[in-house]
Image: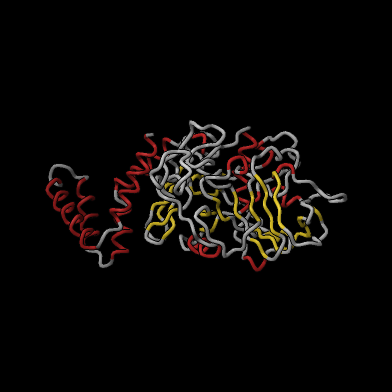
Amino acid sequence: MEVNNLVRELSRLNDDLLNSKSQLTAAASMASSSAQSAASSDQSAKSHADRARQIAGLETVELAVEAVFADERTAMIAAVLAAISGGKWVVQPDAFGNAQVLYRAPAHTFETLAISGCPFAGVLDCFVRQDGTIRPYVDVPVYQMSNKGGRAVSQANRDPWVSINADVARARCVELGANALMISHEVWAMLCWNMISQGYQPRGNTEFGRSHANINEFGRRTDGRVPNDRAGTARVLTGSGPSAWRHDGTDFGVADMVGNVWEWVDGMKMSGGQFIVADYTGQPEAQWKETGVYISNTGQFTNTPPTTLNSGNQVWGNMPKAPGYAGNEKLQRLIIEPIECTKHLMGRLYWNLDGERFPHRGGSWSSASNAGPAALSCYTPRSFVNSTLGFRAAFVS
């Protein structure tokens, strides 16, 4: 696909920028000489020569990388990706100079989505800041994060970063920039509400490199094996599946929300069976609030603490509610508690009522029908690491 070729070229250029200073300086000096010789016949070349001299004279690798990132080649590819995606994609350098390929979601309301039977109104939660003002957009990494020299990047055709616990994943996201964080339940839910609005649910790598629901859909396995080979590690390279594996069913949607690897999601945790939830995207964890909503030891949404700290699972949309339980709007808006207009979303809910549990969503490459946009695991502690569990960042305006 031409889009992936452009993304690969952008990543290659970005890698070039992160080479040693001597390589950068040599390349810049050559560019300066070339531009100077052309300046007599083309006045526009003067600016290129000046730019090259500036790069060649920089004293640190960091400054050189920052300067070269503005080179016309990189800017052109980023502009092309933005143009052919209709503005859905933006390519931004992070705090370390790495290119992040992002899906830009503009602020919108439940009314705009026009979902039949939806009881909610107003701006979706992820766009509301702490002070109540509206952020104009949220940038969601198109790809699950991968490890590039110890830094998290959203780039195509890379092995997802796995075997990382919740706190380290959060730190790798936050360090990417002033507005960076680990994807929150508000952001995840926003994408789910958009799926519902469009009457679409993505598939994904849910059966060892392919979709269990449509076996002719597959990605490129990181271990080089063929789809449905039950040996090896069946993750696929980021974004290597078809457009049906994007959140909106187009080439320019968010990839791999269903299957491939589970993703840590911030802004909610379970403690003793109770949901503890943030008031807004990016709220410090120490300020999250108890909801008074529990999963009972019989597997129901309830306002009564469980009497037995057991574990279990159920199809998310079929989760029952205890007699007298009226529901919790916040959990419903975050696609944590199902309601009539959301219960058709695929996925399974897993819980462990003993102690603190930190959630991940989406499913993995072996989850089959248990994966889905609503798949939610509140089963493991925040320290859990596994080859089927990764993460995704978000950038909030």
Left or right, 68 with reference to 376: left
Q: Relative to residue 271, is residue 113 depicted above or below?
A: above
Give the residue furthest to the front: 231
Q: Which residue is drawn at 48% across and 39% down?
A: 228
Q: Position of residue 35 (x, y in %)?
A: 17, 49
Left or right, 50 with reference to 381: left
Regarding residue 392, the answer to whether it shows in the image is no
> Which quarter of the picture shows residue 378?
bottom right
> Which quarter of the picture shows residue 379?
bottom right
Q: Where is residue 342 in the image (x, y as percent from the top left)?
A: 70, 40
Image quadrant where one finds the N terminus: top left
Left or right, 239 with reference to 346: left
Residue toward you, 385 or 132: 385
How was the colour assigned to the protein in this rendering? Answer: secondary structure
Q: Which residue is drawn at 51% across and 54% down?
A: 390
Q: Relative to residue 299, is residue 1 depicted above or below?
A: above
Residue toward you, 129 or 271: 271
Q: Relative to residue 369, is residue 60 depicted above or below?
A: below
Q: Position of residue 313 (x, y in %)?
A: 70, 50
Q: Residue at x 28, y 53 (%)?
A: 16
Q: Position of residue 328 (x, y in %)?
A: 77, 51
